[in-house]
Amino acid sequence: MFEKKDKQAENAENQNPVPEAAAVNDAAAPEADGKEKTVELSAEEKLAAELADAQAKYLYLQAEYQNFRKRSVRDIADARSYAVSSTLVPFLSVVDYLGMAKSAAEQSDNLEALKQGMNMIIGEFDRALEELGVKKMKTVGEKFDPELHDAVGYEASDTVPEGCVIREWSGGFTIGEKLLRPARVLVSSGSAPADNGAEAQEKE
């Protein structure tokens, strides 16, 4: 009979653990949950952290700016080099023709052949300019335009109307809609005045 009571007491203990064990388990529970208490930063520590972050961003932006400047300088140099090379390429054949003309002039006295050679060079030069979008202006016989022409003088003419170009000293060129160089021209001042002395002799 006593043995039966002891077994019942043992079963009761197993079903109802002692409070101390429960207290120990409750104390360990926060660690099992993995939750940690957050530490409050002081105002000075917050300002120090913000300053460090701002300094890091500043250094990053400064490095980016320096890289941008280097890229810009390199891009400008490349663009300039490309512009020079693309401008010179059409004129290389003109240089070739000039060299051939020089050799021909040294070996021959045929003026007609030399003249033809010079015409070829001029034609090649005009084609090179045309490839670059450069056009030579037509001036002789045209109305004088101070925006396009630079008058070097005036001369009387019975064939060219007053205010029109008689001769061209140096050609004018345009590139697209832009004036590249004005033409230097001689402008007609109209018909020459009658010789009063000759008219007087005729009357006598």
Image (cartoon, grey):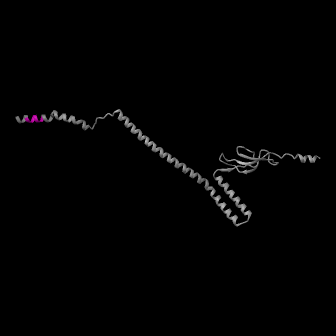
Find residue 152 and report its horizontal and vertical position in percent.
74, 47
User: In this rendering, is residue 2 above or below 179?
Assistant: above
Q: Nearest the camera: 175 or 111?
A: 111
Residue found at x 12% / y 35%: 11
Residue found at x 41% / y 40%: 55
Q: Residue furthest front?
A: 197
Find residue 65 and report its horizontal and vertical position in percent.
48, 44
Q: Residue furthest left?
A: 1
Query: Which image quadrant: the N terminus?
Result: top left
- On the rendered structure, is 118 left or right of 24? right
Q: Nearest the camera: 163 or 62?
A: 62
User: In this rendering, is residue 97 above or below 68?
Assistant: below
- On the rendered structure, is 15 left or right of 111? left
Residue found at x 65% / y 55%: 128
Find residue 82 and report its horizontal and vertical position in percent.
57, 52
Q: Main secondary structure of the magenta part?
A: helix
- On the rendered structure, is 116 left or right of 59? right
The range drawn in magenta is 6-11
* Magenta-drawn stretch contains 60: no
Q: Residue furthest bottom?
A: 107
Q: Nearest the camera: 83 or 48?
A: 48
Residue found at x 73% / y 51%: 169
Find residue 106 and report its horizontal and vertical position in percent.
69, 65
Corner quadrant of residue 110: bottom right
Count of marks, rendered view: 0
* Magenta-drawn stretch contains 9: yes
